[in-house]
C-alpha cells in the first residue's frame, strides 16, 4: 500500500538516485546481473522505492514498488500521461483503488498492453489508466502492484480478478517460478536495490533463507502477511503475537496503538504533532534493538535501522515506527525500513514468505 505522507519533515526526500561507486557492487552487477533478464533495478524517488515500466507507446513510468496491492497502473502525472500504443486495448472496465486509508486513490479504466520491466517483456498486462488520482507526489507515475492476485478482487466493476505482473511473467514462460525477491538498500547507501523475478539473488545474502507460511488470519491472509510479535531490548514486550503485512509501498513500520505506546515508553521518544516519534542524539545513543519474531527466527532492527536517514548530524532523529490506525484489522505492517535490512521472497505457489539477512542488515549509514 502507498503512503500519502512518505517522508517525515522532508527528511531523506532524494530524487532519482543510486549510482554504483564501489568495486564490490560493480563486480556484482557485471558478473551476476548482466547475465539475468529477470532482475530489475530499484531506484529511490521522493521517499519511495520505484521501478521503471515502459508501455508499447515507449512511454516510461516511474512506479512505486508495492507488495501491499496487486494492481498496476500508470499516468498519475498530467505531464506524463498514458498514451495508447500498438499493443493497447481499452477494456472499457472501470476500476478503483484506495490505498492505506490515507486518502491516496486511483479511479480509471483497465487497459491491456505490452509492457517492459527491465529486460522483461510482459504481453497483455492489465494496467490502469486514470481519470482521477489523489495523494501521489510529483515524480511518481503510479503503482507496480506485486501483491497476491487475490488483492485485485473488487477493483474492477465486473468483479473479476486481474492477473498481476508476476502471474503473467510466469504464465508466459519468462520466469520459472511465480516468486519475487525484494532487496532494498538504506537511504544513504550509494547502490541500487533489486527485484528478482522467479529466483533468489543469493549474491546479496549473508544468511540462509527461512520460510514461514502466509498467515491464515483474515483479512491479512489476503495479503503478503505473517504472524509475528515484537520485543525491545531483548526483554521488553512491545507487540503481542498477531497478523501483519509486508508492504514495500509503505515508508514506515506501523504497530497497533497499545504496542506503539509501549515502544514510545521504552524509547523515551516524544510524539510530534505529525504523528512521528522524535528522540535526541543522547537517546539514540541508548537506543536498543527492536526484535521482530517470525516463526522461530528473530529479525533484529538495530538502533540505526529504527531511524530515518539524516542529511546532517544536526538533523532531527526520527523513528521509523508509527501508530497503526485503530480501524486496521492487522496489528502491524513492515514497510521499506524492514526491507532495507532483510531480503524477502514471496512465493505464490507455496503461499510462503522467506527471509534472510543481507549486506546492509547491520549497516549504520542512517
Image (spheres, rainbow, N blue to C red):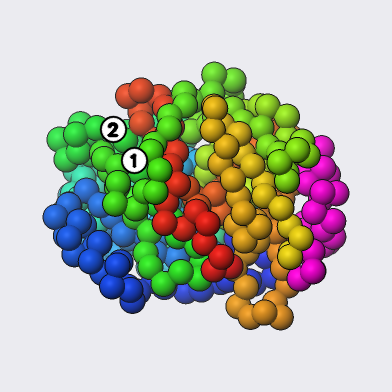
- Bin the neighbour count of mark 2 within 10 Å (Cα to Cα): few under 14, some 14-19, many 20 and up: many
Task: Locate residue 64 relative to residue 105 in the image: left or right.
Answer: left
Query: Against 208, is 350 above or below?
Result: above
Look at the image and give the residue range highlighted in magenta.
Answer: 257-283
**Mark 1 burial class by Cα count in 10 Å: few <14, some 14-19, many 20+:** many
Who is closer to the viewer here, 250 or 291? 291
Q: Distance between the residues labelled 2 and 1?
A: 7 Å
Residue 293 left/right relative to 154: right
Residue 183: horizontal and vertical position, in percent?
Answer: 40, 52
The extreme top residue here reads 216
Q: In which quarter of the image is residue 49?
A: bottom left
Q: Which one is in front, 79 or 360?
A: 360
The residue at which mark 1 appears reads as: 180
Considering the numbered disc 2 on the image, is that residue within a helix, a strand or a loop? loop
Q: Which of 43 and 213 is in front in this view?
A: 213
Point out which mark residue 7 bears: none
Is residue 19 shown in magenta?
no
Amino acid at each position: 500500500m502507498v503512503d500519502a505522507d512518505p517522508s517525515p519533515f522532508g527528511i531523506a526526500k532524494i530524487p532519482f538516485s543510486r549510482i554504483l561507486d564501489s568495486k564490490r557492487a560493480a563486480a556484482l552487477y557485471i558478473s551476476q546481473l548482466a547475465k539475468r533478464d529477470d532482475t530489475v533495478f530499484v531506484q529511490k524517488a521522493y521517499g519511495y522505492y520505484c521501478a521503471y515500466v515502459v508501455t508499447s507507446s515507449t512511454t516510461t513510468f516511474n512506479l512505486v514498488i508495492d507488495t501491499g496491492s496487486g494492481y498496476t497502473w500508470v499516468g498519475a502525472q498530467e505531464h506524463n500521461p498514458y498514451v495508447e500504443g500498438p499493443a493497447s486495448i481499452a477494456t472499457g472496465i472501470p476500476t478503483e483503488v484506495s490505498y492505506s486509508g490515507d486518502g491516496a486513490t486511483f479511479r480509471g479504466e483497465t487497459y491491456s498492453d505490452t509492457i517492459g520491466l527491465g529486460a522483461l517483456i510482459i504481453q497483455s498486462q492489465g494496467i490502469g489508466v486514470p481519470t482521477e488520482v489523489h495523494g501521489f507526489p510529483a515524480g511518481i507515475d503510479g503503482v507496480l502492484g506485486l501483491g497476491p492476485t487475490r488483492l485485485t478482487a473488487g477493483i474492477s466493476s465486473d468483479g473479476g480478478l486481474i492477473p498481476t505482473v508476476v502471474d503473467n511473467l510466469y504464465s508466459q514462460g519468462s520466469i520459472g517460478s511465480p516468486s519475487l525477491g525484494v532487496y532494498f538498500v538504506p537511504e544513504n547507501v550509494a547502490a541500487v536495490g533489486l527485484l528478482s523475478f522467479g529466483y533468489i539473488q543469493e549474491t546479496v545474502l549473508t544468511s540462509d533463507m527461512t520460510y514461514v507460511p502466509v498467515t491464515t488470519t483474515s483479512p491479512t491472509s489476503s495479503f503478503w502477511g505473517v504472524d509475528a510479535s515484537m520485543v525491545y531490548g531483548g526483554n521488553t514486550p512491545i507487540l503481542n503475537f498477531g497478523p501483519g503485512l509486508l508492504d514495500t509501498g509503505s515508508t514506515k513500520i506501523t504497530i497497533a496503538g497499545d504496542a506503539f505506546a509501549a515502544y514510545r515508553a521504552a524509547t523515551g521518544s516524544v510524539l510530534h504533532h505529525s504523528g512521528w516519534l522524535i528522540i535526541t542524539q543522547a537517546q539514540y545513543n541508548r537506543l536498543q534493538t527492536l526484535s521482530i519474531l517470525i516463526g522461530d527466527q528473530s529479525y533484529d532492527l538495530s538502533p540505526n535501522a529504527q531511524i530515518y536517514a539524516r542529511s546532517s548530524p544536526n538533523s532531527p532523529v526520527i523513528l521509523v515506527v508509527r501508530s497503526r490506525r485503530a480501524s486496521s484489522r492487522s496489528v502491524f505492517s513492515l514497510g521499506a525500513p524492514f526491507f532495507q535490512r532483510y531480503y524477502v521472497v514471496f512465493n505464490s505457489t507455496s503461499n510462503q514468505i522467506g527471509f534472510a539477512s543481507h549486506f546492509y542488515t547491520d549497516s549504520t549509514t542512517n
